Amino acid sequence: MKDILASEMSEKGFQEVFSEVQSYISENFSTLITGEVEDTDITKEQLKNHIKKYLTDRKLVVKDMSMQETINHIYIEMTEFSILNQYLDSTRTDIEEININAWNDIKVTFSDGVTKSVEHFFNPQHCENIIRRLLNRESKMVLDKSRPIVRGHLLSKIRITVMGDGVIDSSIGLAASLRIVNPKKLKKQDFINNGTGTEEMITLLETLLQNGISMCITGETSSGKTTFMSYLLTTIPHKKRIFTIEEDVREFDLIAYDEEGKVLNNVVHTRTKKSDDPTKVIDQEKLLETAMTMNPDVICVAEMKGKESFAAQEAANTGHTVITTTHANSCRATYSRMENLCRTRTNMDSHTLKEMLKDAFPIIVFAEKLEDNVRRITEITECVRDSEGNSKIVTLYEYAVNETTKDSKGNIRIKGEFVKRNDISERVQKLLMKKGIRLNDMSFFGVKRKEAV
C-alpha cells in the first residue's frame, strides 16, 4: 500500500515546490503575506493551512522533508527572512556580523572571530526579496533604483548597509553588511580572558572615567570600541547620572534593575531624530547642548563623526566627563582626526584647536582587531603637560608583539604581551587623590610616589 501511495506523490526539489506555492498564495491570498492584515497566530495558521492544502491536493513532497517540515520551511521563506532567520535570532549571542557578497556567497562572523561561509539564497531575485522584506519590516527603509544604497539600523540593534542594482551587478542580487551590535554584555573578566587587556589596564580606565577623566576610544570598524565603552559605562557608580547620545537607534542598555524591577542607577538614553523637515531634525550636536543643561556626571557620545565633535570637546573642557569613540589609526592620530571633525564648527588655528582637544580628551585608548581575530587594546596614551604648558603624548600601556606564526590550517597566531611603559601623570594622580583615591589604591597601577604630608 505504501508503495502505491508513494507512486502517487510527486517528489520535487524544495525550490521548485516553494516557487509553485508562492505563486499560488500570492495570487489567491496575498494579504496574508503582504502585511495588509494583522500578523497574528490566526493568520499564521491560515497561511500554513493554505500551504498544506496546496501540497496535499497536488500530492507534492520535497525529498528528505516531512510534510510539516515542508510547510514550516515554505512559511519562513514567504513571511520571514529565509536563511538569515537563524542568524538574526535575538536570543543568540554568538553572531557578530553577516556579510552578503552575492546571493550565493554569504559569510558569517562569530564572536570567537571565526568567519564561515553559510548556506545561500536560491537566486539573485530571492536574495533581493528577502533583504527588501527585512529593510521594510524592521525599519521601513526602501531599496530601489532611485535609492540603490541604504544605510541604517534595524530595530533589533543591527547596523545594516545594502547596495543594490545600479551600484552592484544585478546578477549577484545585492551586497549587504549586517553588524550585530554588542551581542554579549561582557564583564571585566571576559575582556581579560579574551585578551583585550590586563586587569591593571582595565581597572585604570574604570578608575579614570569614574573620577572625571574624559577619554576617547579609537580604532577601525569592528575593533570593539563600542562594546568596551559600553562596559566602562556600567562601572559608573549608580548615584552618578549618565547621559548617552546615539545616532538613529539606541544600542546602549545601561539601566540596572534590582530583583523587584526597581531602577538602581541614573541613566538617560537619547538618540538622534531624522526628518525631511530641517526644523524638526535633532542631531547629536543638539542632544549635546541639551545634555549639558540636565546636570549629567558622565556624557557618552557614541561616536564622534561630525559637527558634534566640537561640542563634545567644549563639554569636556568645561568640566563635564565625556567618553566617546571615533575612527583613527593610532592614539596620536586621533587628535588630528578630531581636529578635522571640528572644522565644520570653527576656524580656529590648527595648533590651538589640537591643544584644546588634548586637554578635553587626555586619555586615548586604541583598540585593534589583529590578524588572529583577537580584539585588543594595543595602546593607552595620556597627554601630559610640563610646567611651561607644553604637551607631550605619553604611552601608558601597549601590546608588544613577540611572534607571529601560522598553524597547520593557515590560521595566524600572535604571541605578545601587554607592557606598562609609564605611570599616569602627577597631575592625574593629584586629581584622583582629591577624589578620595588613596596612594595605596594607585599602587595597583604601578604608581610609586611619596605621598605628600
Image (tube, rainbow, N blue to C red):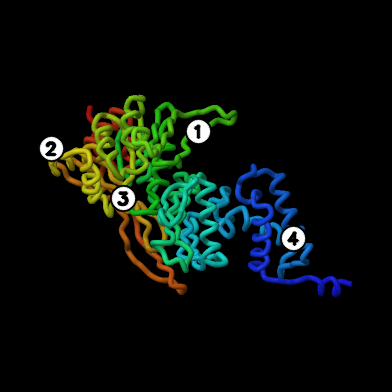
Q: In the rendered structure, find residue 389 and report the number of the disc placed on it.
A: 2
Give the class, few, some or many, for how many residues have Cα within 10 Å of label 1's Cα (few <14, many ≥20). some
User: SS for tag 3?
Assistant: loop
User: SS for tag 2?
Assistant: loop
Labels 3 and 4: the sequence-earlier one: 4
Q: CA distance from mark 3 to mark 4?
A: 54 Å
Labels 3 and 1: the sequence-earlier one: 1
- Residue 412, by quadrant, is bottom left
Give x and y (percent) for residue 339: 21, 44
Is residue 182 shown to the viewer in this render? no
In the picture of the structure, the residue carrying the numbered disc 1 is 256
Q: CA distance from mark 3 to mark 1?
A: 29 Å
Q: Nearer the viewer, mark 3 or mark 2?
A: 3
Q: In the rendered structure, find residue 54 and report the number of the disc placed on it.
A: 4
Marks 4/1 in contact by CB < 8 Å: the verdict is: no
Q: Nearer the viewer, mark 3 or mark 1?
A: 3
Q: Residue at x 15, y 39 (%)?
A: 348
> Vertical placement of 171 versus 418: above or below?
below
Q: Is residue 61 left or right of residue 351?
A: right
Marks 3/2 in contact by CB < 8 Å: the verdict is: no
Q: In the rendered structure, find residue 327 and report the number of the disc placed on it.
A: 3
Q: Nearer the viewer, residue 407 or 249?
A: 249
Q: Residue at x 71, y 58 (%)?
A: 71
Labels 2 and 4: the sequence-earlier one: 4
Give x and y (percent) for residue 74: 66, 59
Labels 2 and 1: the sequence-earlier one: 1
User: SS for tag 1?
Assistant: loop
